[in-house]
Each structure stands twice: as C-alpha cells, then as structure tokens.
Amino acid sequence: MHDPLSTGRRLASRAIAWQAGATALTALAFFPLGARYALAAAVGGGAVFAGAVVAAWMALGGGVQPAGAAIGRLLAGVMLKWVVVFLMLGLGLAVLRLPPLPMLVGVLAATLAFVLANLLKR
C-alpha cells in the first residue's frame, strides 16, 4: 500500500536533518572569528531549521484531507515558517545584538541544504 503522507514525512525529516547539519557546520566555520559570530550563524540557520519544522508539522500534521484543505495547510505552513524565521532573526539582531553577516550566511546555508536534500532524494 502506498502512503503519500509517510513519503512526505520522510522527505521533510531528511531536509530538516540536512538543515541542522549545515547550520552546525556553518557555526563551526565561524567559530574561529569568535563565539558571537558562531552564535549568529547558529541563530540564522536555526531560524530556518525551526521554520521548516513548523512548516512540516503544519502541512503534514492533518492526515488525509480533501485537496483544498491540504493546499490550505501547506500555504499556512509556509507562511508560518517565514513568520518564525523573521521573528528569530529579529530577536537575534535586536535583542542579542548579533552580527548580521554570519546570521545571513547561516540562513543561506540552511536554505541551500533544504534544496540539496530535496534534489538528492535517494
């Protein structure tokens, strides 16, 4: 029996794992510049990671539904993902006063890891 939800969950889990790995590697790459730079890269990548977790939970958490409801959950998940990303980035910049460049590199690394994980679906 073919279960499309389990396939979606498996793909989402793989992409989230790749994002976590890319975030950790980016933070390690910035560590020689200082702990604040490494933390900024971790916050940037962690924002995208957290957003992806929220989007996957929202999009895949409802079980089998009619097409309209499934698309609605998918769109709501994507919107909620970017709300989480921008809130975490705003907190990192305004409250923690982290440097923005490593944070942006962390965002880019996690986003590219998401794309690569979905391209290499083996």
Image: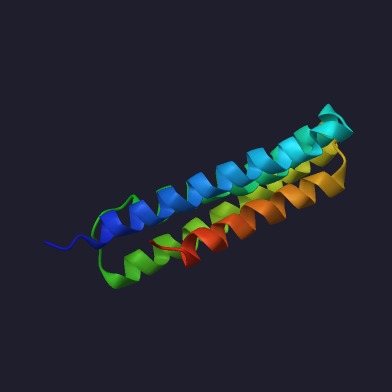
Q: What residue do we see at 53% from left, 49% from top? A: 18
84 or 15, nearer to the observer: 15
Q: What residue do we see at 83% from left, 36% from top? A: 37
63 or 121, nearer to the observer: 121
Q: Quick check: 18 left or right of 2?
A: right
Q: Quick check: 55 left or right of 36?
A: left
Q: Does any portion of residue 10 appear in the rendered image?
A: yes
The quadrant of the image that shows the N terminus is: bottom left
- When the figure is inspected, residue 79 is found, relative to residue 43, above or below; the finding is below
- When the figure is inspected, residue 9 is found, relative to residue 92, above or below; the finding is below
**Image quarter of residue 5:** bottom left
Q: Quick check: 19 left or right of 88?
A: left
Q: Quick check: 70 left or right of 111?
A: left
25 or 7, nearer to the observer: 25
Q: What residue do we see at 82% from left, 28% from top? A: 35
The quadrant of the image that shows the C terminus is: bottom left
Q: What residue do we see at 25% from left, 62% from top? A: 4
